[in-house]
Amino acid sequence: MDDTCIFCSIDRETLAENELAFAILDRFPAATGHSLVIPRRHVLTMDELTGEEALALFALIRQVKTLLRERFGPDGFNIGINEGEAAGQTVMHLHIHIIPRTRGDVENPRGGIRKVLPCRRRYRHGEGPA
Ligand code: 5GP
Ligand code: ZN
């Protein structure tokens, strides 16, 4: 527990939860239904998770995907972790983003999360935006 941490002290209205992890809707969603799956214990990186916590997080990801499919009927998901400031992490308590995606929500979705580095997002020579 870290008193200064949003995810340790958040007043949770959980989407789903288990003994070791909980899931909430992102307050500033990148897409409708954008959710965060979060270990209850304050850790910064995946490396600090116990095996049990890792399994609990994975189980919850699957549960949240099912829920989001029922509620929003997305066509796909981006699932990912920003680990470390250099990778864009802003809340220093590990969390897994689940971002529902809909066909046509961007012009060319090919490549998905690899596009976090815009200068290297070309999927294959001659394909997609530079
Ligand atoms: P990061 O940038 O660390 O990978 O992601 C932090 C995420 O937490 C962001 O998507 C941001 O919108 C979300 N967030 C920040 N503050 C709050 C909050 O108070 N409540 C919720 N539900 N999400 C938050
Ligand atoms: Zn925390």
Image (spheres, rainbow, N blue to C red):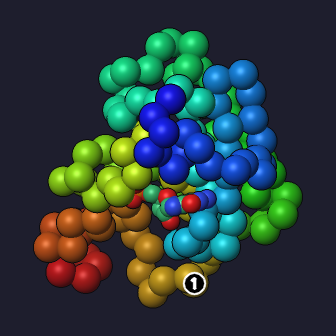
Coordinates of residue 104 in the picture (x, y in percent): 57, 84
Along the line of sight, which residue is nearer the eye, 114 or 97? Answer: 97
Q: Amino acid at mark 1?
A: Gly
Residue at horizontal 84 percent and vertical 63 percent from the top: 71
Q: Residue furthest front?
A: 3
The answer to whether residue 6 is left or right of residue 124 is: right
Coordinates of residue 89 in the picture (x, y in percent): 33, 53
Along the line of sight, which residue is nearer the eye, 127 or 97? Answer: 97
Coordinates of residue 45 in the picture (x, y in percent): 35, 32
Compared to 72, does 66 lie above or below? above
Point out the image quarter for the C terminus: bottom left
Residue at horizontal 54 percent and vertical 45 percent from the top: 7
Compared to 48, does 92 lie above or below? below
Kindly state the secondary structure of the residue where label 1 is placed. loop
- Residue 99: name its quadrant: bottom right
Query: Counting other residues with Cα less than 10 Å from the Cα at mark 1, is it few (<14), some (14-19), or many (20 or more)?
Result: few
The answer to whether any part of residue 25 appears in the image is: yes
The answer to whether residue 122 is left or right of residue 57 is: left
Compared to 40, does 90 lie above or below? below
The answer to whether residue 1 is left or right of residue 108 is: right
The answer to whether any part of residue 100 appears in the image is: no
- Residue picked out by circle 1: 104
Residue at horizontal 55 percent and vertical 20 percent from the top: 53
Coordinates of residue 78 in the picture (x, y in percent): 51, 57
